[in-house]
Amino acid sequence: MVEGAPEGQPAYVTVAAVDDAVLQLTDQHSPNPIDHYLGKRRLGVELRDSFGRLIDPAVLDATRTRPGAAPRLRQVGVTVPQKSERVVSLFSGVLTVGPEGKVAVPLDVPDFQGRLRLMAVAWSGDKLGRSESSMLVADPVLADLGLPRFLAPGDRAVVPVTLDNVAGPAGAYTISLIASGAVSLSEGSIAVPELGRGKRATAGRVLTANGVGTGHLALDVTGPDGLRITRQWEIPVRPASPLVTRRTASMLAPERSVELPADLLNGLRPETATAALSLGNLPDLDIPGLLTALERGGPGGLEMTASRALPLLSLGDVAVALGVASDERVKARVQRSVDRVLTFQRTDGAFAAWSPKGEADSWLTAYALDFLGRAKAAGYRVPEGPYRKGLDGLRGALDNAWVEADEQPARAYALYVLARAKMIDAGAVRYFQETFWDKLQTDFARAQVATAIAALGDKDRAAEAFGRLSGARVVSASLRDYGSSLRDEAGVVALMGESGVVERERLTQATERLSKTYAAVRTTGVQEQAWLLQAAKALIDRAPGMKIAQKDQQGADQVAEGVKPLFQRIDPAAPPAIRNAGGEPLRQILSVSGIADAAPGAEEQGMTVTRSLFDMTGRPADPGAVRPNDRLVVILEGSASDPVDRQVLVSDPLPAGFEIEAARFAGGGAPLGDLSWLGELTAPRAVDYRDDRFVAALDMTKQAPRFRLVYLVRAVTPGDYAQPGATVEDLYRPHQSARTAASRLRVLPE
């Protein structure tokens, strides 16, 4: 009911219904338009310095005394654990108020037990109004299933089935529990002979995870007076082993057909294995394998978020053709990445690595704006205000003529981004090229300058600049451009193709060298994977056509000429009938990915990592005799054999049946009680508590080549669970890593 609307004027209202527990968790107040529009506000103050705009940076004396460096600030970003339960958040949209101030708002509430906060905002003419109330949503008989947040194949959880007669009739009740998908039950029927009002009945059932995927559980309760309650749950069954990706490259001779080896999927779990074929005259860059690798989850920092989505802007159609993701999923993932990247933007328009409160990173700022600009050009939703503010900040930074050596690659990237956005004069790019070209530490930075020159119309100068690339990467330990020699080589190929000033033969030669470099590495990081795919895209656009024949449904050959490189997901049980109908050999690449049958053993490649379990007093815990509600202290320790400055990622997958409670580290973390026995701890750059793992990003230096992290878990659900190995890896030297052996933990019944 809306009261007080002006006579003869329409009135409008919006209504939101949100889980009150979530709103209280975040201390979220109900909308108050009166305070928003009419409340008093403190005046804002801005300080601006225009001195840098008074003198052209090109004529400043670069030999002036360098100012002292500002102290580095450390920022730890901690996120709230992700909820696996469904959160209710409903919004009506704008509704027109009917006669007598009445409006009906239907709420399609899903399977939910709890309290909803109802929040309404109304307006008409120059009048505003608001109201709020709460609504309890509950069945007369509460039926619940105490599921862990996830399982792994082979896990056996003892889940409690609870029936709580709050306001239902007394009498006999029957419970039917059905499992399907990736889980199964030992027994699904439960009889409750007599359940009085205000009484509760509980029974345990063994839930077993049979394979990777999603398990479905349906609960059907029948009782007196025709009472019937149905509920459904989903539980993810995540792999306990890492994703394995392998490829086989060969040449398909003229008039030969594609053949698949019989052992193509050996060693992989069948429900997770996928195979893809790429066929053409491109060098071996394994586009299917790289796209699959980027599909894997990872830490939520700015650089990795942008790197995982960047190739999908230009190769989304290839990802769809290979079955890596559907078109809807590709678009949704890119848009989520755009939204996520913007959460790292500071108030001054710059970007930080792990939190908007962190230290501005000039190279990452350019990288983020490069990604956002490409996404905007591809039609994704990029808010104009933050994007423009970031570009203005990049342009404003150029007013400072002094460029420290470690900041030169970031300045080159900024020039490239501004040139793509047509927000810089060609003279500023030429000045930077003439002044800093020989001082730049990487060919990637030089190629960015050359591409910026090409984007501003000077094709001849750009072509000449590409001809002066040296192929060297000479960097100091303090330089953070998030790259490697492989990333630089891939980035140069991608920019050669983008610039349009490098002839196809030279581009192909550069890609052949890149494919050899790629074949020689054991593992790759996401930055390398992203730019390898960007380089592959440059080749696809310029690839000569090929002639192939495919059989139609009637078995007849359908010959096509001038075909671009072929990418397609394949069924190993039904090999594709594709023949090379041309006169030149074609490169055939078979890419296979899936979860390994067996968990890998412990491994050390230039780094070490250990995981230890203790009780709250510091005594070693027995992993085979944990009790429900026991709190365990998990200590992760590691080191690097080569003492250099590095950024590392530590990941410790949880066993099912356990939940993270808190973490403790140097300079912060949640209080964990009397844990003085822990000793010295490491301060991470970022920490993420997830449903199924603990993740921390941290710096290791020459002076401190070791780390020690601590977090607390609580045993929740009885059962026998797999515990995958903990891992540590250098984010930008991915060949340096370590992993502990997998094991099992058992939570005994109460």
Image: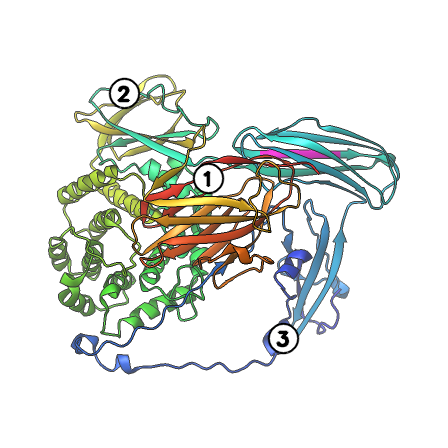
Q: Amino acid at mark 1?
A: Gly
Residues at marks 1 and 3 touching, judged by CB atoms closer than 8 Å: no
Per the image, the residue denoted by label 2 is 257
| Foreground disc of the pair 2, 1 | 1
| Foreground disc of the pair 1, 3 | 1
Which segment is the magenta one? 215-220
The residue depicted at 63 percent of the width and 71 percent of the height is 33
The one of 105 and 691 positioned closer to us in this rendering: 691
> Residue 444's spot in the image, x, y percent?
22, 54
Q: Residues within 10 Å of mark 1 (few under 14, many from 20)?
A: many
> Residue 348's spot in the image, x, y percent?
40, 71
The residue depicted at 44 percent of the width and 44 percent of the height is 610
Residue 217 is one of the magenta-drawn residues:
yes
Residue 711 is one of the magenta-drawn residues:
no
Per the image, the residue denoted by label 3 is 35
- Is 402 displayed left or right of 706 in the figure? left
Q: Amino acid at mark 2?
A: Ser
- Is 116 displayed left or right of 315 in the figure? right
